[in-house]
Amino acid sequence: MTAAVPAGIEADVVVLGLGAAGVAAALTAAEAGADVLVLEKQAEDRHTPSAAFAGSMIMVTVDEDQAARYLVACAAGGTPEPECRAWARGAADLQDWLVQRCPGLTVHDLTGHHAGSIYPDLPGADGVVTREFRLPGQTAGSGELLHRMLLDRAVATGRVRIRWASPAEELLRVETGRVIGVRAADGTVVRARGGVVLATGGFENDPQACRTYLRAWPTYFTGNPGNTGDGLRMALALGADLWHMTVVIGRQCTHVQGPDGRWHNYQMGLTYDPFVVVDGEGRRYCDETAYVRIHTTWHEMQLWDHRKRSFSRVPSYWVFDSRRFARRLAAGAEPVRSTRPRWSDDNMAELERGWVVSGDTVRELGEKLGFPDPDELVRTVEGFAAGAPRGEDPFGRPAETMAPLDRPPYYAVRLFPGGVNTAGGPRHDASGRVLDVRGTPIAGLFAAGTVSQLIGHTYPSPGAGWSEALTTGRIAGAAAARGADDPPAEIPG
Ligand SMILES: Cc1cc2nc3c(=O)[nH]c(=O)nc-3n(C[C@H](O)[C@H](O)[C@H](O)COP(=O)(O)OP(=O)(O)OC[C@H]3O[C@@H](n4cnc5c(N)ncnc54)[C@H](O)[C@@H]3O)c2cc1C
């Protein structure tokens, strides 16, 4: 599949990162006639872009004007209208684009809270729907397979070369400020005749960057461990402006140490079985079902308690009884090449390791969790049970998700803010051009995907991550290919 890269490397378009956005950028640029070179940080046999952890639900646009309004409303000021509109426009033909490029792909409508906009009360919510894209014989979609199909298609154009295990480290530019190439970690210089597309993913696995830009800490994420903010740093070095740096596509994660001493992050499957989420004192603080339906409950976890001078909801504790324990607690797909140990189906190995804590009574569980007053957890569970028959809940939890926790033993798992990826990064315009701190495009530099996602504080719809990455990848790839018609000056030195 991989073509070797010769010495004296040069291409029309250089794409940094080969995840969802990078593959879309490379394929689009190649189809526009550009000669494309991709630098990918990970080795081919260890490549685990976040795209490979995802399903294959993808948000598409059914009405551009409505969708643009909706995306603006979801961004809540974090992403301007022209960029939201570019996404809405680009996602309008996304379904056809995928089906034409991936033979055998079938498209499935979804039901319930997967079907479309998560916030039907926001303006324009009817402008987007989510569909699942499956390969023949699949009963559920796979982001890993979808990514592979797009990658095969890109390579099949004969215009895309890939340099694996080659992290980009520094963007190169000439005196006019135009970006003309990139230096990889091994010192190799790659010249871009048209443009460089940053598609290196978020900064979610750089703890220092997370501490600098996100509100609460520690945070833990379950996607590609190689997404360590390299694109952010490269853009910052050129004076790029930033936007919505505090935004995270949140999920509920636990962070645990394996028998070999290595630490792992797992996404937990908080379902509608009876459960509560409590803070470090055993108190509930929100409608926990939002953990399941939407990506924004992490907002609730970030409270800074000025009295205690701590993030008192970090960690939080997912508390349930034997009914939930009978089913696998971890959620999400694991790519074939992932090195994270698989969470067991019966949760027994994790219980033995202490990743799951148990108690014969709620009070005993509270004691084992080290709560200052274990009876507080008892009062919480009793209060929840008392409201359940009437569907009464101070946090507005839907009645059908409430039932007493009354089947011992009781269990708890620690939860941290974090989840899928960070969304902030170098600001870019509707054409994918990275803007400097004065709002001027940095010539020759484009961004796509989670290195600088368009998603703001409110996650619009299931499948918005794929939708954004593919759309911005296509936009940036096309723009960089157009830049190849107007090659810049020689590379210095
Ligand atoms: C567990 C999980 C579940 C998800 N589920 C869904 C879902 O169901 N639906 C949905 O729409 N979205 C989902 N997402 C989100 C979706 O996967 C992302 O929005 C999408 O993959 C982002 O694409 P990307 O190209 O920006 O990043 P990635 O796919 O992570 O690709 C980034 C690439 O850049 C490479 N890279 C990093 N640094 C460098 C460097 N210096 N030089 C060269 N290469 C570099 C990385 O190795 C990686 O290959 C999920 C994500 C996760 C983690």
Image (spheres, helix red, strand yellow):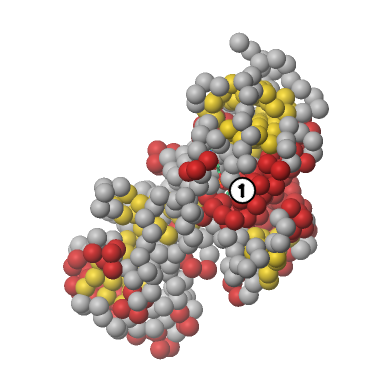
**Would you say 60 lies left or right of 309 here?**
right
Classify 261 as above or below 303: above
x then y, percent, for residue 182: 60, 25
Relative horizontal placement of residue 307, taking residue 481 as reference (left or right): left
Secondary structure found at label 1 = helix
Q: Which residue is mark 1?
A: 20
Residue 73 at least partly seen: no
* Residue that protrudes farthest toward the top in the picture: 493
Q: Position of residue 105 (x, y in %)?
A: 70, 61
**Most foreground residue, 295 or 483:** 483
Residue in view at x 55 percent, y 35 percent? 164
Image quarter where the C terminus lies is top right
Give the position of the N terminus as an image quadrant. top right
Q: Is residue 352 above or below residue 197?
A: below
Figure check: 153 above or below 492: below
Q: Residue at x 19, y 66 (%)?
A: 368
x then y, percent, for residue 209: 44, 39
Q: Tell which residue pokes out farthest to the bottom in this image.
A: 389
Q: Position of residue 330 (x, y in %)?
A: 40, 64
- Can residue 167 be seen here? yes
Whether ligand 1 has any atom under 8 Å from the Cβ at mark 1 is answered as yes
Foreground of the two, 74 or 462: 462
Compared across the picture, whether 474 is left or right of 341 comes to right
Query: Please, what is the three-letter code of the amino acid marked with disc 1?
Result: Ala
Give neighbour class at mark 1: few <14, some 14-19, many 20+ (Cα, 10 Å): many
Residue at 53 percent across and 47 percent down: it is 49
Q: Nearer the viewer, residue 67 or 10?
A: 10
Q: Is 60 positioned to the left or the right of 46 in the image?
A: right
At a point 43% along the width and 48% down the height, the residue shown is 215
Quarter occupied by residue 434? top right
